[in-house]
Amino acid sequence: MQKLTSLNDLKAIRKRLAKEGVLAPNKKKIRVCCGTACRANHSLQLADNLRAETQRSHEDVEIITTGCQGLCQLGPVMTVQPQGYFYHKVKPERSGDVISRTIMGGKPVWDLLFRRSLGEKPAYFIKDVPFYRKQLRIALRNNGRIDPTNILHYLAIGGYSAVEKALAAMTPDQVLDEVKRANLRGRGGAGFPAGIKWEHTKKAPNPIKIVIANGDEGDPGAFMDRSIMEGDPHSLLEGMMLCAYAIGAEHGIIYVRHEYPLAVRHLSIAIEQAEALGLLGRNILGKGFNFTVQIREGAGAFVCGEATALVASIEGERGFPRPRPPRLSEPGGGPWGYPANLNNIETYVCVPHIIEKGAGWFLKTGTAGSPGTKVFALTGKVKNTGLVEVPMGITLREIIFDIGGGIIGDKKFKAVQTGGPSGGCIPEQYLDLPIDFDSLVKVGSIMGSGGMVVMDEDNCIVDIAKFFLSFCQSESCGKCYPCRVGTYQMIEILEKITSGNGEEGDIEKLEALGKYVKRSALCGLGKSAPNPVLTTIKYFREEYDEHVREKYCRAFVCQGLGQVSLNTDICYQCKRCVDACPYEAIKESDDGFFYIDQVDCQRCKACFAVCPLGAIEIKEQPVIYIDRELCYFCRNCINVCRVGAIRETSTGFVIDGNICKKCGDCLKECPMGAIKYEKVGRILKSMAVEVVDVPVPEEQEEPIEEITLDEIRKDAEEKTCAVQKSLTFIEEFIAGPMCGRCYPCSLGTEEAKIRLLRINQHLEEAGEADILALRSIASHMRESSYCKKGRDTGRFLLEKLTSAEEEFRMHLAGICPKRECISSLSYLINQDLCIKCGECAHRCKFDAIHGETAESDSSKYIYFEIRQRGCVRCGECIKICPTGAIELISKVQEEFIRK
Amino acid sequence: MKVEAIDVNGQIGRIGEILNEQEKNRGILIQALQQTQSAMGYLPEESLSQLSQKLKLSLSEIFSVASFYRMFYFNPRGKKIVKVCLGTACYVRGSKKVLNALEQEFNIKNGETTEDLALTLETVGCVGCCGLAPVTTINENVRGEITGSGKLKEIIQSIREK
């Protein structure tokens, strides 16, 4: 190729191409989509087969391997010119049919035409396919028309004419004004007007500026940038050239994700060809404009899509974002300190049109605030997935139901997630919302890069929120705390909820954390990371509540929620579930049916997935409780329970709902029918609602914090023993007013508490040293605590130590003179008073009292005695004893009596 | 590609005109690491220390950069690298099941390599083929719409061969 040295050369080459008939409309040609998705369906082999067939048939057909044509799901797709037939799902072996029927015969291949259903007439041309009908292609206009690896194709369809126009007749300021007037908003997510950004960069005083295209498209579910880079790389180069011309830059960098090898290949071919033709390099088209472009490959870090992190990555550093200012457009902001203009791929691709056709033309499409079109990657549970370019202001319903063809299997639409992991979930009620940058923000989501993931009733919203958050969490660079720690904590809570361990208040905690992270994270990634969680809580609160309160996931996604049971009426014993169950929880009963053992079942739902008949049912977990009116403590239920969920308390038996597996064994075993099985979890819900309605939180907690020292002193003085007094005072001080700010107080009180407990409990290591230590702690606190609270506490302790020193020493010997410290006391039965009624032995829960009740033959019975090892001094026996025979005696006295 | 063969000026391109020596060396660091890795399959410590001498950067700085980005590996990897996409679209269509099945089939966990260095199993955020979800890539080849067990078996077969 000869280098073009002037504008006339460019015109001449276009004339030559037209003469040669490159891409002429009446010529026979087949455009085969060779985007990544169609390649996966062997479209390259299809193109090769087509080439071989044409040679064999001696037809003059041009086979063009184009970039992504949009309808990825029905690939490989192709259009056949000059008739314009649109074929889908063309397998490589069908190439012969296409050549013989359409190219040679001029008739369509019927079964390759698109039909919505068998009964309907097929769509012959691309404009008849519903997927394309509502689309308006500006950014994607060349995708699917040209061979991206051939610059002549691009020139033949009028490529580089915007650059030609700008270099010939416009000053840089005019180019800038045109873009500004068109109000082109950044397609990368935030929607900042590109013209204003360009102007900022232009105004920076540095003579050297850099143009950067951000192709680090990391959002899962978005692939429009990839399609453009693969299918129309020259448009991107042209857009960047116009930007460079407008702001006076000479260097351009395209930052491409590492995961897009094909995009890198096509871009480097495009740059090579443009340099060979003299459209890049020095003195472009003889107009004295210099511009070069380089590709930088990313290395697999999502955060590098953030502008400042991207710059760090270009410089060869770790991809950490940094606080702004300086902005990229300011001196010191861009790579190596040069001011830089950074835009999204899609933004640059729109520029050549604006320059070529004028800002007025661009303003005619879209809405007033957001003119133009936007490319969406429509994915998820829709019938037609793929790339969709629509004018701004179209409704979500039109995109999902008209273009996307509705939900797969005509299930119920649940939500649509826009803006990737940083966006939000939009529920059904907003389906008729006209979408542009501002309207999406209003409903709590963002436009983002344009990912649009549709979810149906089979998707659990909590699980989806967890998925997005865990993506952001794993991609967090770790520089700032709110993002690194906050998102981790949020995932912990979500994990808890989805595994069936959610508690009341978890959702509120999530919301609070989300708001903190949103407010305080350093970069866009962190600031938007809680968005999916916050929007789903906002719109799908009841589903969260269901997970927490009823332990039920209505989409049957979350493992560990709901109760899995087998409906024996439907089951025909194929045993698939038995094989699938990793926990061997599906067992055969005596009558030959299968049943699910709830104790072994981990609710993984593997059986649910394999059952061909739908005999496995997932229901809300039932509630099992013991009716205390009926229970007569036979302990049968305790004996039969395999998980130990039934506990004995002072008021009766209780089933621990957290441990209980709801297997129902105890139900069968109870002779009284005291165990009730409430099938509907809603009862719990109504109960839970009542609990929630009680205003527990913060307001009540505050007065507790305000406990004054006087109150504590009053409490402490109620005790009679000096050791107890000091201990109560210290314990309440630690629990209440202590702030922990100064050491004498925070460490001193803890140490004092330990020493006091030692004395109080009469432990072996208690000794004289403890009293000395207490004295020194108290005097330290009195002298050097920061505030009056601490000094007063010290003083109180010191007072007690001085006034009741003898009492402390007696404690060391195991005597509490006031008979208050339990450890230095024992219970003893005064045999003179005991009438041998046996009440105390019945009442004692710890089996510490032994003896025989009085009988007629008075010589045989054994005295009632308290076994000190078993006794925990709970006091129940004292309460029950009718004669007051049980006495408190300090240990030392007891030993004395025994001797 | 040998570390000695890395051409700093050639790599950095025309933008090198506006950079000093140190900035150029640093600027190509990620590219140099990528090339080393594509030649060796991973980043052996030896190559990194050679790189550190070549680019006049301390080894710790190189480690700091290499450990930040996800695509760099310090351990040898399998001959076939299978990446299961866990992007939103694939996740929604059940790619977790594909991952579980592969984990069970080859008895390795996500991110591990089989002992005979035949296979490395990984997950990826999104390969941009959401139209074909759920997607798995074997080396560079994309396999889409892995919905039934038949397709899964096909994939396991193609991983096993050679």
Image: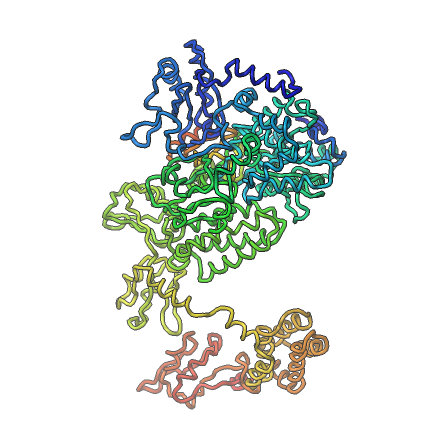
- Quadrant of the rendered structure where residue A710 is? bottom right
Q: Is residue A356 visible in this depiction of the protein?
A: yes
- Quadrant of the rendered structure where residue B22 is? top right
Where B55 sits versus A890, above or below?
Answer: above
Q: Residue at x 69, y 24 (%)?
A: A283
Q: Residue A496, how many percent across, how many down? A: 46, 55
In this rendered view, identify the residue nearer to me: A563 or B17. Answer: B17
In the displayed structure, does residue A732 sit left or right of residue A399?
Answer: right
Number of numbered discs visible in the structure rendering: 0
Quadrant assignment for the N terminus of chain B: top right
Q: Residue at x 65, y 70 (%)?
A: A746
In the displayed structure, does residue A356 sit left or right of residue A577?
Answer: right
Q: Residue A867, how many percent across, how many down? A: 46, 77
In the displayed structure, does residue A532 sit left or right of residue A124?
Answer: right
Q: Residue A669, how many percent across, how many down? A: 28, 63
In this rendered view, identify the residue nearer to me: A829 or A618. Answer: A618
Colour scheme employed for the rendering of this structure: rainbow
Q: Residue at x 52, y 29 (%)?
A: B140
Q: Residue A765, how many percent across, how many down? A: 62, 73
Where A141 sits versus A58, above or below?
Answer: below
